Image: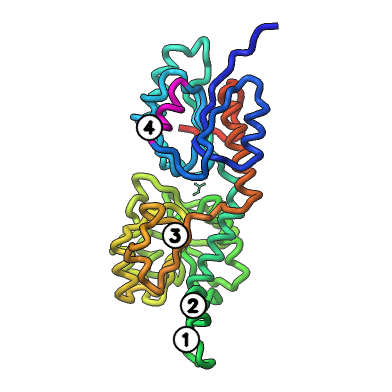
Amino acid sequence: MRPVRLMKVFITRRIPPEGIAALSRAADCEVEQWDSDEPIPDKELERGLAGAHGLLCLLSDRVDKRLLDAAGANLKVISTMSVGVDHLALDEIKKRENARWLVITSICPHVHRSGYTPDVLTDTTAELAVSLLLTTCRRLPEAIEEVKNGGWTSWKPLWMCGYGLTQSTVGIIGLGRIGQAIARRLKPFGVQKFLYTGRQPRPEEAAEFQAEFVSVPQLAAQSDFIVVTCSLTPATRGLCNKDVFQKMKKTAVFVNISRGDVVNQDDLYQALASGQIAAAGLDVTTPEPLPTNHPLLTLKNCVILPHIGSATYRTRNTMSLLAANNLLAGLRGEPMPSELKL
Ligand code: GLV
């Protein structure tokens, strides 16, 4: 029997059990892992990745030119346990894919492929987005605090009033898989109208919600609730800035579950502190984690969560298994269950 040539796989963190079990069962792989729940230091990552054929990483790992150079020529597959891919230097990965394709296409038809984990986290993330929206617009953290600190002195007609979804207009920035799943969940709350914006109209997807495609300024001006679900790209970086907040209604609630960098946080702070908009709910910030002395944390009308959109045991397990299966398929030159098309 010919000895199996082992491929080295490096995992940048402890991951949920199903993924690690799948990789451990792979007889053709030798798995090394940063065995911690905390991020791997840069130097350790460079050391661990040197000579590796496959990398399984998280959204908090920056895979840039320096790291790709440090990895060396063996590296064939990058598999991220996330739907977002803004932490991967896609232009660098693409360059390498093309360059190596020309050199070794006949012996190794699949070089430098990347996998990600869309779909499996859509429902869980939409559920979190709706929770965050309701938590923010009905001021739940403030109300809970008042119960604890003795601020609850009586039933008062205008105390702790917020804004509700019934008869509202909801604007969704990015009507992709997660945006649609959010709209589907919000509709039964009595939303009157859905607006959306994005690169281009998506009439088929929008039909389910009779959602109207509008420009960003139109969406800002007309919405009672804005939910940001688009991916972070050069076109969406800083998209939600003072121009957008200035156009929003004073009573509007802003929710971001995408990436912190889609929002200009200084502008958001000003809009919230000055009462230009009513409230914001953020599951994502810049940076992550947000320093505990950040000005946004001083505001009662800003609810901040620690990037937990996909955080259920089941979903994280499924993500880890999909990331492992992407990696294994890529290394073996087989079709990946979820390949990122560059
Ligand atoms: C979460 O933000 C993800 O990209 O999976």
In the rendered image, which residue does mark 4 sit on?
Answer: 43
Measured Cα–Cα span from mark 2 to mark 4? 43 Å
> Residue flagged by tag 1: what amino acid is it?
Gly
Q: Is residue 259 visible?
A: yes
What residue is rendered at 60% in x and 47% in y? 316
User: What's the CA distance linking mark 1 and mark 4?
Assistant: 50 Å
Whichever of labels 1 and 4 marks the residue nearer the N terminus, that label is: 4
Spatial separation of the CA atoms under disc 2 and disc 1: 8 Å
Q: Which residue is mark 1?
A: 151
Q: Residues within 10 Å of mark 4 (few under 14, many from 20)?
A: few
Residue range corresponding to the magenta coloring: 42-51
Quarter of the image that includes the C terminus: top left
Query: Looking at the picture, which amino acid does disc 2 mark?
Result: Glu
> Marks 4 and 3, how far apart in space?
33 Å
Disc 1 + disc 4, Cβ < 8 Å: no
Q: Which numbered disc, 2 or 4, marks the residue that appears first in the sequence?
A: 4
Mark 1 or mark 3, whichever is nearer to me = 1
Helix, strand or loop for disc 2: helix
User: Judging from the image, what secondary structure is the residue with disc 4 in?
Assistant: helix
* Residue neighbourhood size for the residue with mark 3, other residues' Cα within 10 Å, grouped as few (<14), some (14–19), many (≥20): many
